[in-house]
Image: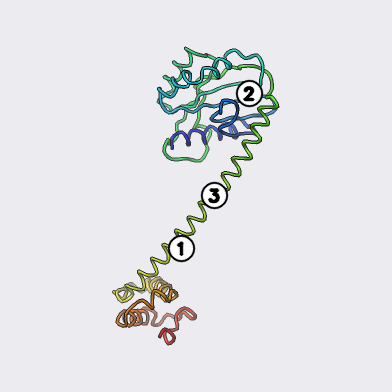
């Protein structure tokens, strides 16, 4: 979860903090964690959650870092490159970067690593400014890669949202059915002394129970009798037309 939170925060920083119109993740020749572009420049962010992660990046991506350190043009190389790390890793990140490519910048994240929060200007701070790797505007290849990736991410997020909403609705409907069944089976015990202001709530619960005939029908005769007695006592004096027609229950 931590890396996902950092990526989301990095994207928000580029979009709202740096005002970049194109922002995406997992893009380009070296699969940048986060990338932001406008007409003048591009900024790449690599997120790291431990000292070993930072060191491994220079060990496992030798070609990428050699290119970033010796470039004279654009291609898939950003204008500026940052590591985004939790506040506690700022010192480690700065130390490691200085030994490889001093032009790389460091961003710190001061939010909750385990829970996404709304974007705020002070959640990310520039702790070491990234220097320009080159001065050319974003290449057509990089711009196209970002646009395609943004489209893919948008489609993927919409699909996930639809799946999530369907699962949530299914879960709520299942919970409602289980709750109604519980009400129907325990209706006889809902007759305990209640403050007068609670009568309306109790009546609604009992009405909801009877609107699930399968649950009501599953009760034995004593259960149905207990429910009717409870419903009558609770709703006595409460004119709730259209909720319960006790005469038609059997």
Q: Quadrant of the C terminus?
A: bottom left
Q: CA distance from mark 3 to mark 2?
A: 31 Å
Horizontal and vertical percent position of residue 49: 43, 28
Residue at the disc numbered 3: 161
Q: Is residue 199 left or right of residue 69?
A: left
Mark 2, secondary structure of its residue: loop
Horizontal and vertical percent position of residue 157: 56, 44
Q: Earlier in the sequence, mark 3 or mark 2?
A: 2
What is the number of the mark on residue 173? 1
Tags 1 and 3 touching, CB below 8 Å: no
Mark 1, secondary structure of its residue: helix
Q: Is residue 140 left or right of residue 185?
A: right
Position above or below: 193 against 26: below
Q: Is residue 244 left or right of residue 67?
A: left
Within 10 Å of disc 1 (Cα), the crowding (few <14, some 14-19, many 20+) is few
Nearest the camera: 195 or 76?
A: 76
Tags 2 and 1 touching, CB below 8 Å: no
Q: CA distance from mark 2 to mark 1?
A: 49 Å
Q: CA distance from mark 1 to mark 3?
A: 18 Å
Mark in front: 2 vs 1: 2
Q: Quadrant of residue 179?
A: bottom left
Residue at the disc numbered 2: 76
Q: Quadrant of residue 178?
A: bottom left
Q: Quadrant of residue 236?
A: bottom left
Within 10 Å of disc 3 (Cα), the crowding (few <14, some 14-19, many 20+) is few
What is the number of the mark on residue 45? none
Q: Earlier in the sequence, mark 2 or mark 1?
A: 2
Within 10 Å of disc 2 (Cα), the crowding (few <14, some 14-19, many 20+) is many
Q: Earlier in the sequence, mark 1 or mark 3?
A: 3
Horizontal and vertical percent position of residue 239: 45, 81
Horizontal and vertical percent position of residue 91: 42, 19
């Amino acid at each position: 979860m931590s890396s996902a939170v950092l990526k989301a925060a990095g994207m928000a920083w580029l979009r709202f903090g740096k005002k970049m119109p194109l922002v995406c993740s997992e893009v380009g020749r070296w699969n940048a964690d986060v990338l932001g572009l406008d007409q003048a420049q591009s900024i790449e962010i690599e997120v790291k959650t431990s000292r070993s992660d930072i060191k491994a990046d220079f060990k496992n991506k030798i070609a990428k870092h050699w290119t970033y350190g010796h470039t004279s043009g654009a291609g898939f190389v950003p204008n500026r490159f940052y590591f985004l790390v939790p506040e506690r890793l700022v010192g480690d990140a700065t130390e490691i970067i200085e030994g490889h490519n001093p032009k790389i910048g460091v961003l710190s994240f001061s939010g909750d690593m385990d829970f996404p929060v709304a974007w705020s200007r002070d959640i990310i701070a520039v702790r070491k400014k990234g220097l320009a790797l080159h001065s050319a505007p974003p290449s057509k290849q990089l711009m196209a890669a970002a646009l395609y990736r943004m489209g893919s991410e948008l489609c993927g997020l919409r699909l996930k949202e639809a799946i999530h909403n369907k699962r949530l609705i299914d879960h709520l409907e299942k919970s409602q059915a289980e709750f109604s069944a519980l009400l129907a089976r325990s209706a006889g015990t809902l007759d305990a002394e209640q403050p007068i202001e609670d009568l309306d709530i109790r009546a609604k619960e009992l009405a909801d129970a009877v609107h699930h005939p399968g649950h009501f029908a599953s009760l034995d005769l004593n259960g149905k009798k207990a429910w009717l007695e409870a419903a009558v006592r609770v709703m006595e004096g409460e004119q709730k037309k259209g909720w319960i027609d006790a005469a038609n229950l059997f």
